[in-house]
Image: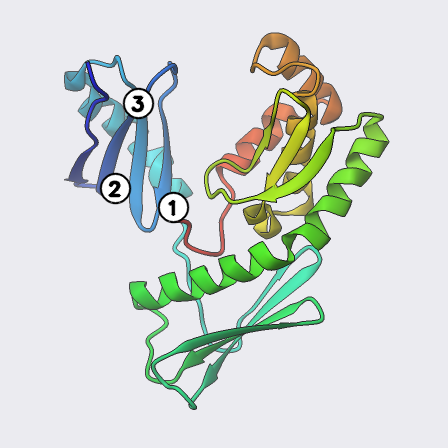
Amino acid sequence: MGSRQAMKFTHNEIGPVEITFRKNTSKISARWKNGVAVFIFPESIDRKEIPDYVNRMASAVIARKREVAFAESQVIEVPGFTFLISRQSHQPRNVWGTVKDRKAYIEVGTLLDFDNLNVKQTISRIMSNIARDVAAEILIPEAKAIAAELGVSPRSWAIMNGFKTLGKCSARGDIHISYMCLFLTSELRGYIVRHELAHLSEMSHSPRFHAICDRYCGGKEKELVRKLNRFPWQILRR
């Protein structure tokens, strides 16, 4: 039997909802993606039970919603880097992005509406591209410092693409960190790195893995997971 198809509908409280299914999981989760609440269900779930789960989770999902907003003269600071947003009239229907001295200058045409979804997506894409370009010089030194502090050493470090998967560790000991981690707080960047370093000792998400990860996180693994799940991203993620 093939994978179940995603479902889309409008919930009377949440608004647009997308239901997706995942193999090899027993957990039900939800996240916001470009204004749509995306629920992830185990593939084995009875379809008739889905509306009840969505209704029960509605309040918590709504509470986590945060609209991404951009504005003229806005400054978005992340650890080690700054994005500055301004207007430009040379090409009033375009958005530009340039980088100098760990600062990105996002210039938005005067005829473009900051509240328009397409404009938000364009600004977010440019900021993502800049993050991809600068991530290695910011994130990898931080990761190496954490590894040295813990006394562990992966075979290599690299930056990867990834909006949902923020890190991964191969069986050979190669660790990849998503450039999207640039937008996280230092605390959450550190959690992603420590999580992947724990995989050097245990590849699966077993009780042993979580014990190692929790030790690496100073006993705060569960707290950091909650913070990551509730993190207010400042750009739209694809």
Q: Quadrant of residue 36?
A: top left
Neighbour class for label 2 at 10 Å: few (<14), some, many (≥20)? some
Q: Residue at x 69, y 47 (%)?
A: 139
Q: CA distance from mark 1 to mark 3?
A: 19 Å
Q: Look at the picture and state if 46 lies above or below 224.
A: above
Picture coordinates of residue 201, whole percent (x, y): 70, 15
Numbered label attached to residue 138: none
Picture coordinates of residue 89, whole percent (x, y): 42, 90
Q: Amino acid at mark 3?
A: Phe
Q: Residue at x 47, y 76 (%)?
A: 96
Q: Amino acid at mark 2?
A: Ile
Picture coordinates of residue 77, whole percent (x, y): 62, 62
The residue that disc 2 covers is: 14
Q: Quadrant of residue 20?
A: top left
Q: Amino acid at mark 1?
A: Lys
The foreground one among 88 and 100 is 100
Picture coordinates of residue 165, whole percent (x, y): 50, 35
Label 3 residue SS: strand
Q: Look at the picture and state if 67 lies above or below 82.
A: above
Numbered label attached to residue 65: 1
Quadrant in the picture for the N terminus: top left
Numbered label attached to residue 41: 3
Q: Residue at x 37, y 85 (%)?
A: 92
* Nearer the camera: disc 1 or disc 3: 3
Q: Residue at x 74, y 28 (%)?
A: 154
The foreground one among 152 and 117 is 152
Q: CA distance from mark 3 to mark 2?
A: 17 Å
